[in-house]
């Protein structure tokens, strides 16, 4: 008979009755006895279970290290420690604390030690000094390097902050939270991740492929009307409006922190060809004018009613217009994602904290989730919503993104 793992339960029951030391002794005796019995009965299975446990323990230790590393990355990013360090090599804690604006030396010293221990910083023993290697600077100090990673730390903070609400949502005590409750952190992380994507991939590599290049020509030369729906803080819309000054852009958003950021951003840039629209008051579908180009960047899988937005776009897209959707690449259904998506563990986690709650934030919400909008689901949805031409392709140079080109 295979061993059942009951020594642990016995130990837990005994925990109430015995003190810590006696409990440890009891557990160890039970474990030894169980192991001896099992070795006799199912040696291979027991060995495999032990190996699996050792493997998982190592995995969890790595995850714990990763979690603490991302918390420290958040500090390094927000306190501009990476940016400060990128100007030269050979930093001591006191020098860095001063250069970063008068920080507490002892705290900076511990942060430096952690960063060196996890391989982000180089540490020189002779001089007891620290340096930020070029590769680390590209990932952590340079917003527009094209491989900037630090905003994921802010995204993780946004995830942790909403855990109490998520516990209530899991228990059915409230609806899942929207982007409103995610506050400034998430809008900030989105902006810092998506602006480089737009600048280095979406604008130069995707737009030339849409409508055989004619969208890019129209954006460059004509006074066309464009909508960015689910624009968050309008950071990507600003990239577009700056790049294409003859076109007019409307940035539609529903979340108040994002709308606030968008309005402040647009005011600060002084752009005349960009207006922020509160989609709660003026939804896209209520527009009296037709749009030549509509974009949704990382939005569709977040919507509680994606079909409703599809119908609205169908209403307001000009007959020769085009809707371009960027969404997260999915391998298809859950089985395929678990088995084949290289980032499934990360994306399913982000989904639980951010995207799925948004999709479930209304009664009857569709709840697609981060990996829930693959082409085999999306394409029939577009067709059923009245679009006859649908084409999908991976974003060139950034295969984490799937692009849909949708026309009437
Ligand atoms: C992942 S964010 C999009 C990021 C943004 N497009 C960018 O490129 O940085 C998804 C956004 O869609 C917004 N949203 C959700 N439902 C919406 C709706 N019906 N109309 C407009 N925006 C919506 C959310 O509030 C959230 O800010």
Image: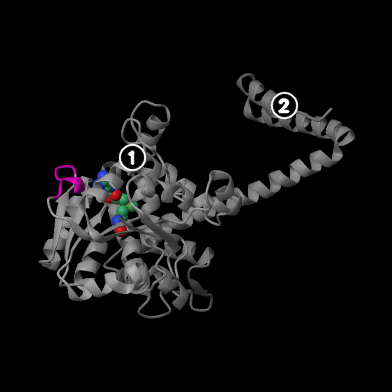
The numbered disc on residue 14 is none
Residue 95 location in percent, x, y?
35, 73
Residue furthest right as drawn:
40
Query: Which residue bears the numbered disc 2?
Result: 6
Pick the residue in front: 248 or 188.
248
Magenta: predominant secondary structure element?
loop
Indicate whether residue 406 is drawn in magenta.
Answer: no
Question: Horizontal placement of 210 versus 243: left or right?
Answer: right
Q: Residue at x 32, y 40 (%)?
A: 305
Position above or below: 406 against 25: below
Residue range highlighted in magenta: 280-287
* Quadrant housing the N terminus: top right
Query: Residue 161 appears in which quarter of the rendering?
Result: top left
The alpha-carbon separation of the residues under discs 2 and 1 comes to 44 Å
Q: Nearer the viewer, mark 2 or mark 1?
A: 1
Residue 24 location in percent, x, y?
69, 32
SS for dot 2: loop
Residue 361 location in percent, x, y?
32, 36
Query: Residue 231 appears in which quarter of the rendering?
Result: bottom left
Indicate whether residue 286 is drawn in magenta.
Answer: yes
Question: Horizontal placement of 94 versus 26: left or right?
Answer: left
The numbered disc on residue 304 is 1
Q: Earlier in the sequence, mark 2 or mark 1?
A: 2
Q: Residue at x 25, y 61 (%)?
A: 321
Q: Residues within 10 Å of mark 2 (few under 14, many from 20)?
A: few
- The CB of the residue at mark 1 lies under 8 Å from ligand 1: yes
Pick the residue in front: 178 or 97.
178
């Amino acid at each position: 008979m295979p061993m059942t793992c009951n020594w642990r339960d016995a130990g837990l029951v005994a925990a109430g009755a015995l003190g810590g030391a006696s409990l440890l002794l009891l557990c160890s005796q039970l474990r030894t006895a169980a192991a001896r019995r099992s070795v006799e009965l199912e040696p291979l299975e027991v060995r495999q279970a032990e190996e699996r446990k050792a493997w998982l323990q190592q995995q969890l230790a790595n995850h714990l290290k990763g979690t603490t590393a991302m918390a420290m990355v958040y500090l390094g990013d927000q306190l501009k420690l990476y940016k400060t360090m990128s100007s030269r090599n050979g930093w001591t804690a006191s020098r860095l604390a001063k250069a970063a604006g008068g920080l507490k030396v002892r705290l900076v010293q511990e942060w430096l030690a952690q960063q060196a221990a996890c391989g982000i910083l180089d540490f020189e023993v002779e001089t007891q000094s620290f340096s930020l290697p070029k590769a680390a600077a590209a990932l952590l100090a340079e917003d527009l390097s094209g491989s900037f990673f630090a905003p994921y730390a802010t995204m993780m903070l946004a995830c942790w902050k909403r855990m109490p609400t998520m516990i209530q949502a899991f228990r059915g005590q409230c609806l899942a939270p929207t982007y409103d409750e995610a506050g400034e952190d998430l809008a900030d992380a989105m902006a810092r991740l998506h602006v480089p994507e737009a600048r280095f991939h979406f604008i130069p590599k995707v737009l030339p492929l849409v409508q055989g290049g004619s969208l890019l020509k129209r954006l460059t030369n004509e006074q066309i009307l464009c909508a960015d729906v689910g624009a968050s803080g309008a950071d990507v819309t600003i990239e577009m409006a700056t790049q294409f000054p003859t076109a007019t852009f409307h940035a539609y958003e529903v979340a108040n922190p994002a709308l606030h950021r968008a309005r402040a951003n647009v005011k600060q840039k002084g752009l005349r060809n960009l207006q922020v629209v509160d989609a709660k008051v003026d939804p896209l579908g209520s527009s009296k004018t037709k749009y030549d180009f509509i974009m949704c960047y990382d939005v569709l899988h977040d919507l509680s009613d994606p079909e409703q937005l599809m119908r609205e776009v169908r209403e307001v897209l000009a007959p020769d217009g085009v809707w371009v959707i960027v969404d997260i690449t999915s391998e298809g259904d859950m089985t395929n994602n678990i088995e084949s998506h290289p980032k499934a563990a990360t994306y399913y986690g982000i989904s639980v904290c951010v995207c799925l709650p948004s999709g479930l934030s209304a009664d009857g919400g569709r709840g697609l989730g981060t990996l829930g909008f693959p082409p085999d689901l999306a394409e029939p949805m577009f067709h059923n919503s009245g679009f006859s031409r649908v084409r999908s392709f991976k974003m060139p140079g950034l295969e984490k993104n799937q692009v849909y080109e949708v026309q009437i």
